[in-house]
Amino acid sequence: MPAELPSLLLSFLAPWRNAPTWRVALSGGLDSTVLLHLLAQLASREALPPISAIHVHHGLQAVAEGWPEHCQRFCDSLGVPLQVARAQVDGGASLERAAREARYAAFTAALEKGECLLTGQHRDDQAETVLFRLFRGAGVRGLSGMAAQRSLGAGVLLRPLLGITRGELERYARSHGLRWVEDPSNASNDYDRNYLRNRVLPGIVERWPAAVETIARSAEQLAEADGLLGELAQIDLISAGVRTEYIGMQLPSLAVAALAELSEPRQRNALRHWLAPLARLPDRAHWAGWQDLRDAREDAEPIWRLADGELRRAHGRLWWLANPWLGFVPTNQIWRDPSQPISLPGNGSLRFEGAPPGGPLEVRYRQGGEVMALPGRGSRDLKRLLNEAAIPAFLRARLPLLWRADELLGVALLPDLRVEAGQGWTLRWTPPTNDSGLS
């Protein structure tokens, strides 16, 4: 099988032959060492994108201090540029997860538009991942294992060795005299993945020698099933009138009633796919929050709180609000130079379209009881005007209001409201983003 590795690798990477560059995530271990060596060999006889390597140094153990130097020597022998990125690992309940998040944050920061990051996970890693997720109660998506490709920052993450076993990689490495580093922490069964790798999988393979292959094959079938569930979710989300914005703001929403007509499994399936780029998905027990929100009275303002934000119901729709959006604190500001946009702390910016009104101007936020004088309509309560415009209740507290002394001149999102006949200006609001940073 080692003789077939170059052709298998080239076949997998064919769709990305025109990428700006291929970056290899080089840990110095067996799998990434073989991957980089294979690519360097292929580049000597094939027209490939520029190849480089990136090593993320966590500094979690003393022995790792020599790994960047090892990677540099290996890259120098291949004539491949190496970038060493140092990552700070935040302490927490799971050191494994924290290290992984720090590593991928470094990869994301390094990738330019359209670039490919190639990692060395192999068939054994896939089987290990499926078992790990199985014991954590994962569903179809989780049990489909690691994706062979997915977006990562401005580029794409590729795992071209998922069809290759560790044994095949080791035979290739030894046949080419390659040297690699061994992470001593891999021998510690204190970490869940190590326990699976060192204790559980060997016992399974002893009883069922083809287990790694069959587990990986099951993952492929589950990935196909997940793809079909995704297609069903898109059909249901279209029926639910899914939107990504509201009056120019990044406020994803969908119709609650249309979702509620579906069976509960289809409701959860549609919501999972809708929420996937927005938030970490809740576990099964936490889905009661969706039922409470869905079944609340029409005049209620229910909230379903998730790790990265919350879901609210208003005007028959389900709205996503990310944590940064929720942390807004209203702060009044004097607009000293109306000819220039004014920056609103945590709330975007305002500008005038047309000649601004005269007089000292101030940006304030709702306190309750505000009144706006409109030509031909008299004095109207701001609350009534917002009701007529169907502005969701959760949005009203952060609507910038333009005041001149005690006169309310304008309201963001409602540019058609005019305090003077023939008014020559319009208030334009550039709202903040509503992004949890996961997409």
Image: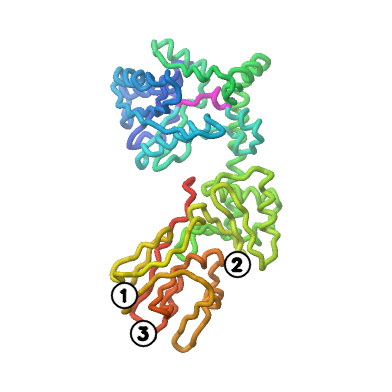
Coordinates of residue 141 in the picture (x, y in percent) = 60, 39
Colour mapping used in the image: rainbow
Q: Residue at x 34, y 65 (%)?
A: 342
- 231 vs 368: above or below: above
Coordinates of residue 313 in the picture (x, y in percent) = 61, 61
Sequence order check, earlier mark of 1 and 2: 2
Residue 354: mark: 1
Q: Mark 2: which amino acid?
A: His
Magenta includes 124? yes
Q: Mark 1: which amino acid?
A: Gly
> Which secondary structure lies at badge 2?
loop
Coordinates of residue 205 in the picture (x, y in percent) = 63, 17
Magenta includes 58? no
Which residues lie in the magenta part? Answer: 120-128
Task: Answer with the quarter of the image where residue 84 lies.
Answer: top left
Coordinates of residue 188 in the picture (x, y in percent) = 56, 19
Q: Mark 3: which amino acid?
A: Gly
Q: Residues within 10 Å of mark 3 (few under 14, many from 20)?
A: few
Farthest-out residue, bottom: 376
Q: Which residue matches tag 3?
A: 422
> Which secondary structure lies at badge 3?
loop
